[in-house]
Image: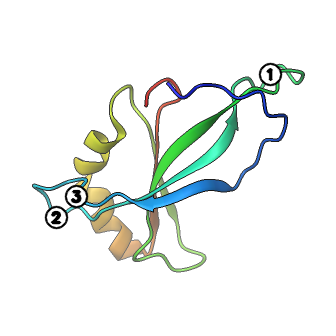
């Protein structure tokens, strides 16, 4: 679990970006871009300014502006395992000109 921060500023922009090469070595699933953004720990308690780094994977090779975003909400397990076993989403991304986004479960990672 990412440790909460007491930083009062919460940004909706990535704080880190890197390619995760070799994520799915036994498949034809493309490597994702790994991104993080600063997420509030508690959205229902305004005085609570704690944050954590929310991790998500992005695959945008086929994306065309105005086309869909295929968003996969994270499960309670390693994000890589779900990313590597979702081949149909990547087929659809090419067909629909979509971007694929996988968000990691809040209490995992």
Tell me what residue is drawn at x 88 percent, y 24 percent: 46
Tell me where residue 96 appears, x and y as whole percent.
41, 73
Q: Give me the C-alpha separation between circle 3 and circle 2.
A: 11 Å
In the picture, the disc for residue 44 is 1
The residue drawn where x is 43% and y is 31% is 109
Determine the CA span between mark 1 and mark 2.
41 Å
The outermost residue toward the bottom is: 64
Closer to the chain start, of discs 3 and 1, is 3
**Residue 41 placed where, x, y %?**
69, 26
Query: How far is disc 3 from disc 1 in space, using C-alphas?
Result: 38 Å
Depicted 25 relative to depicted 28: above or below: above
Residue 47 in the image, given as x and y percentages of width and height: 89, 21
Quarter occupied by residue 62: bottom left
Task: Report the coloring of the rendering.
Answer: rainbow
Kindly identify which numbered label has been placed on residue 28: 2
Residue drawn where x is 25% and y is 53% of the image = 23
Badge 3 marks a residue whose secondary structure is loop
Q: Earlier in the sequence, mark 1 or mark 2?
A: 2
Lower sequence index among marks 3 and 2: 3
């Amino acid at each position: 679990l990412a440790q909460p921060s007491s930083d009062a500023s919460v940004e909706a922009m990535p704080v880190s970006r890197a390619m995760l090469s070799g994520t799915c070595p036994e498949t034809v699933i493309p490597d994702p871009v790994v991104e993080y953004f600063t997420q509030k720990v508690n959205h229902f308690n305004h005085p609570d300014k704690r944050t954590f780094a929310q991790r998500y994977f992005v695959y945008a090779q086929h994306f065309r502006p105005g086309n869909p975003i295929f968003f996969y909400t994270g499960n309670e397990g390693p994000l890589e395992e779900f990313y590597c076993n979702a081949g149909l989403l990547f087929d659809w991304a090419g067909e629909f000109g979509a971007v694929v986004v996988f968000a990691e479960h809040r209490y995992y990672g």
